[in-house]
Image (cartoon, helix red, strand yellow):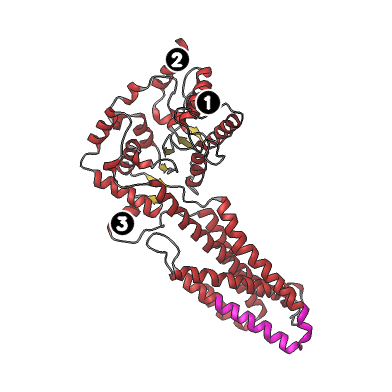
C-alpha cells in the first residue's frame, strides 16, 4: 500500500537513533492509554490473560497496548511509528529505556519517572514500543548483526540507559535486555534504576516520623504552658535551659554519628542507623516542645529583631532535627526501594537468559561470547549500587563497598540538606548578634 510505503521510506530516511519522543509526550501517551483502558478499548488477552490487567498501578501489558492502541492509531496516521507520527523528522536519543513487554504500561511509566536522570537536562527517550513501526514488517531491520540493530544505534546515541525491572518477568531473563546491558558497558553509558522512593511510601514515612512527632512536641509544649504556673520563674528557666542544653548536645552527637555511620552490605538500615534515626525523632519531639515555652523566657531585649533571634534558639534546633529525620527517612526509603528492585531483576547469570527468536538468540550469543562474565559483573554492580558507570565499576574492582551508592534523590536530599545548613547558619548569626563576646569564636567556627 502506498501509505505504508511512505511510512517505510520515512523509517529508512530517519536513522533509528532519532525514533524518539519527549518524556512529556510519553506521559501524555500513558494518560491516553489509561483513558482507553478505562473505557474497555484495551482488553485483556483471552488466550493468555494478564492477572494484573485491571490493576490501576500495573495496567495492560505492552503487547495489548500495542495491539489495541498503538497499531490502530499509527495505521490511521500512515503506518509509521508513534515516534515519527509525533516528530516526522525525529528527535535525538538522550535516554534509552530497557524493559520487558510483559510488564504493565502504568508500572513502566512510574518506573521511568523515578529513574529519570536528575539535575541534568534530558528530554527525549527511546522506547521500542513507540520507536518501531508496529504496522510494518521490520524483520529485515532486525535480521542483522545485533550491533547494527536499531536498538544498538539508539543506545549508542543515548547518554543514559534506564533499566526497568518489573513484577511480571525478570528483565535480564530476556536476552535482548542482556545485550543492551552489554552494549551500555561497551559505549560507557550511565545506567539507572527506579530507586527513587515512591510518593506514597514517602508520604507514609513523613507522616509517621515527621508530622506526628511535630504534633506531639507542640502538644507537650501546650501541656507545659498549663503546668508552668505551678513552678517559680527560676525553676521554669532552669527546665527550659537544661532542655535546650540536652537538645543541643543530642543534636551535636547525632550529627557527628550520622557522618560516620554506613548502611549494611545490601544497602539496608543497620541497627546503628536505626538507633540514630529514632534519637533524631526524639530530638524532633523535644525541639518542637520547646518552641512555645521559650516565648515566655524573654530576657528584656530592646529591639524586635533581637526578640526574633532569641525565639529562634529552639526554632532552629527544631528545624534542624526535623530536616535530619526527613533526610534519614529518605535514605531508608532508597535502601528499601533498591532491595525491591534488586529482587525484581531475578538475575542469576546471562547464560540463563533466553530470546523468543532462535536466530536473534544465536546472533546475540555469538556477539557476547567470551564476555559473559563481564556482563554478569555489570548487572551485579547495577543491582548492588542502583546504578552503573565507570566510577562505580572502578570502585567495585578495587573492593570498595558500593551498596546503594549509585543513586539518591538529589533534589529532595539537597533541599533537606539546605534546610539543615540554613538553620545552622541562622543560629550562628543569631548567637553572634545576641552574644557579641562569642563573635570571634563564631568567626573561627564559620571559617572551619
Give yes or no for contact between labels 3 and 2 (Cβ–Cβ under 8 Å).
Answer: no
Q: Earlier in the sequence, mark 2 or mark 1?
A: 2
Residue at the far top: name it: 2
Q: Say what secondary structure mark 2 lies in.
A: helix
Residue that lies at the very extreme toward the left in this rendered image: 370
Q: Position of residue 74 (x, y in %)?
A: 51, 21
CB-based contact (under 8 Å), mark 3 and mark 1: no
Residue tagged by mark 1?
Answer: 69
The residue positioned farthest toward the front in the image shown: 47
Q: Which residue is mark 2?
A: 4
Q: Is residue 336 left or right of residue 388?
A: right
Q: Quadrant of the N terminus?
A: top left
Q: Position of residue 260 (x, y in %)?
A: 43, 70
Magenta segment: 226-250
* Residue 150 higher or lower than 108, as above or below: above
Please name the residue shown 57% across and 77% down the image: 442
The secondary element bearing badge 3 is classed as helix
Q: Is residue 248 visible?
A: yes
Magenta-drawn stretch, dominant element (helix, strand or loop): helix
Q: Residues within 10 Å of mark 1 (few under 14, many from 20)?
A: some
Residue matched to label 3: 396
Verify whether residue 243 appears in magenta: yes
Q: Nearer the viewer, residue 17 or 110?
A: 110
**Magenta span contains residue 281:** no
Mark 2 or mark 1: which is in front?
1
Amino acid at each position: 500500500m502506498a501509505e505504508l510505503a511512505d511510512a517505510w521510506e520515512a523509517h529508512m530516511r530517519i536513522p533509528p537513533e532519532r525514533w524518539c519522543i519527549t518524556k512529556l509526550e510519553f506521559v501524555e501517551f500513558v494518560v491516553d492509554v489509561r483513558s482507553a483502558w478505562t473505557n474497555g478499548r484495551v482488553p485483556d488477552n483471552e488466550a493468555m490473560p494478564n492477572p494484573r490487567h485491571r490493576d490501576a498501578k500495573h495496567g495492560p501489558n505492552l503487547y495489548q497496548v500495542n495491539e489495541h492502541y498503538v497499531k490502530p492509531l499509527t495505521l490511521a496516521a500512515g503506518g509509521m511509528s508513534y515516534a515519527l507520527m509525533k516528530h516526522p523528522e525525529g528527535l535525538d536519543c538522550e535516554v534509552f529505556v530497557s524493559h520487558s513487554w510483559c510488564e504493565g504500561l502504568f508500572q513502566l511509566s512510574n518506573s521511568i519517572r523515578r529513574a529519570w536522570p536528575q539535575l541534568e537536562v534530558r528530554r527525549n527517550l527511546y522506547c521500542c514500543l513507540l520507536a518501531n513501526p508496529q504496522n510494518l514488517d521490520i524483520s529485515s531491520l532486525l535480521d542483522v548483526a545485533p550491533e547494527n540493530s536499531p536498538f544498538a544505534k539508539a543506545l549508542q546515541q543515548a547518554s543514559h540507559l534506564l533499566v526497568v525491572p518489573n513484577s511480571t518477568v525478570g528483565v535480564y531473563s530476556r536476552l535482548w535486555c542482556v545485550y543492551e546491558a552489554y552494549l551500555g558497558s561497551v559505549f560507557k553509558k550511565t545506567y539507572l534504576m527506579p530507586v527513587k522512593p515512591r510518593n506514597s511510601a514517602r508520604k507514609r514515612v513523613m507522616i509517621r516520623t515527621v508530622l506526628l512527632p511535630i504534633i506531639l512536641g507542640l502538644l507537650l509544649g501546650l501541656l507545659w504552658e498549663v503546668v508552668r504556673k505551678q513552678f517559680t520563674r527560676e525553676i521554669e528557666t532552669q527546665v527550659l535551659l537544661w532542655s535546650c542544653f540536652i537538645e543541643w548536645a543530642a543534636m551535636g552527637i547525632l550529627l557527628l554519628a550520622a557522618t560516620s555511620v554506613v548502611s549494611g552490605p545490601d544497602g539496608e538500615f543497620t541497627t546503628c542507623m536505626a538507633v540514630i534515626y529514632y534519637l533524631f525523632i526524639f530530638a524532633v519531639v523535644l525541639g518542637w516542645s520547646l518552641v512555645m515555652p521559650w516565648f515566655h523566657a524573654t530576657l528584656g531585649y530592646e529591639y524586635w529583631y533581637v526578640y526574633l533571634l532569641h525565639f529562634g534558639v529552639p526554632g532552629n534546633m527544631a528545624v534542624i532535627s526535623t530536616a535530619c529525620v526527613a533526610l534519614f527517612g529518605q535514605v531508608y526509603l532508597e535502601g528499601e526501594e533498591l532491595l525491591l528492585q534488586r529482587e525484581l531483576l531475578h538475575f542469576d547469570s546471562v547464560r540463563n537468559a533466553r530470546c523468543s527468536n532462535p536466530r536473534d538468540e544465536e546472533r546475540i550469543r555469538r556477539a557476547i561470547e567470551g564476555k559473559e562474565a563481564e556482563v554478569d559483573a555489570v548487572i551485579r554492580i547495577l543491582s548492588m549500587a542502583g546504578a552503573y558507570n565507570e566510577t562505580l565499576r572502578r570502585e567495585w574492582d578495587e573492593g570498595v563497598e558500593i551498596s546503594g551508592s549509585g543513586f539518591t534523590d538529589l533534589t529532595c536530599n539537597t533541599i533537606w540538606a539546605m534546610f539543615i545548613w540554613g538553620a545552622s547558619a541562622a543560629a550562628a548569626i543569631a548567637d553572634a548578634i545576641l552574644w557579641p563576646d562569642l563573635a570571634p569564636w563564631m568567626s573561627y567556627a564559620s571559617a572551619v
